[in-house]
Image (tube, rainbow, N blue to C red):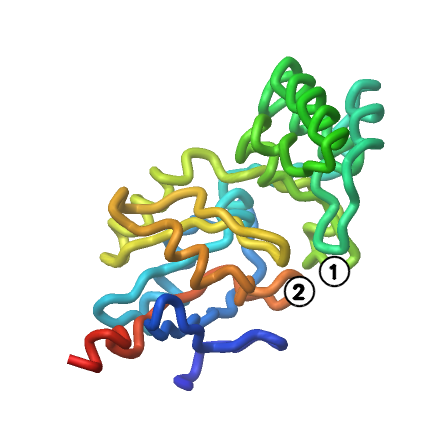
Amino acid sequence: MAEGYVVNEGKNEVVTVDGQEYRRLCIRTHVITDQDKIADVVEKYVAPYLEEGDIIFITEKVVACTQKRAIPMEDIHPRPLAKFLSKFVLKTPYGIGLGIPETMEMALRECGTIRILFAAFVSAIGKLFGQRGWFYNIAGYKARSIDGPCSYTLPPYNHYVVLGPDKPDESAKAISDRVGYPVAITDINDLDGNILGTSDKNIDRDLLVKILKDNPLGQTSEQTPMGIIRRVTEPAAAKQE
């Protein structure tokens, strides 16, 4: 492995998807804040390692942080409705989500009170039938992308609520224009994954989710908020010809 690439603990560098092998090369950076410009960060840390055919993937949190969408907990004052709704959110080991009043308050602001109330109503109906996940299907990616502080969150963000990135497709395009390679902004955790933005509408988002579904960037304090996807072999079918 060339210097600069990282394989996080418990993750594999190479995965096989539909008979094709892909490398996931994670890149360690400094702690990125709203004083940084995300295109500058990618150009500095990722660009030196890029090869033809590569795709850059970037966690949505770091993009949001550069957009001033990381909010200190003490600056959020939850309304009573936020305190009430947060009590009914399923808690998991992989993140707080909307399970605290501060994150629920930001969901109400981001998505609108009516939409969140309707999502909560639909979710309650779903639970009666043993179905989960209906809340976020209704509330949308803005609610799903909100993260609160956890014990493993990298400082200073262990005291922040981080929203989803603004205009993720446009952000991905701007980064791609700078470095000359396709870019995807990802929301991958240890439960599921979504591609929030791509620099080119023809990028196969479903394929990227399959390649990244085990969250190679990590879910704790790895400090690897971006990486490179690189195809390393011909498809199995082509080898047989």
What is the tally of numbered marks visible in this picture? 2
Q: Residue furthest top?
A: 114
Q: Residue furthest bottom?
A: 1
Q: For the residues labelled 1 and 2, say whether their Cβ atoms are less than 8 Å apart.
A: yes
180 up-or-down from 65: above or below: below
Q: Do we see residue 62 in this rendering?
A: no
Q: Please state which of residues 19 and 232 is positioned toward the viewer in this rendering.
A: 19
Question: What is the three-letter code of the residue carrying label 1?
Answer: Tyr
Residue 169 relative to residue 82: left or right: left
- Dividing the picture into quadrants, the one containing residue 98 is top right
Point out the image quarter for the C terminus. Answer: bottom left
Dot 1: few (<14), some (14–19), or many (≥20) neighbours within 10 Å? some
Please give the name of the residue rendered at 39% of the width and 74% of the height, measured from the top-left corner.
23
Q: Please state which of residues 217 and 70 is positioned toward the viewer in this rendering.
A: 217
Q: Please state which of residues 116 and 223 is positioned toward the viewer in this rendering.
A: 116
189 up-or-down from 139: above or below: below
Residue 39 relative to residue 240: left or right: right
Residue on which disc 1 sits:
152
Q: For numbered disc 2, what is the local secondary structure? A: loop
Residue on which disc 2 sits:
221
The x and y percentages for residue 150 are: 76, 52
Point out the image quarter for the N terminus. Answer: bottom left
Disc 1 from disc 2: Cα separation: 6 Å
Q: Do we see residue 23 in this rendering?
A: yes
The x and y percentages for residue 55 are: 32, 61
Mark 1 and mark 2 lie on one chain; the one further toward the N terminus is 1
Question: What is the three-letter code of the residue carrying label 2?
Answer: Ser
Please give the name of the residue rendered at 41% of the width and 34% of the height, measured from the top-left corner.
167
The x and y percentages for residue 148 are: 71, 43
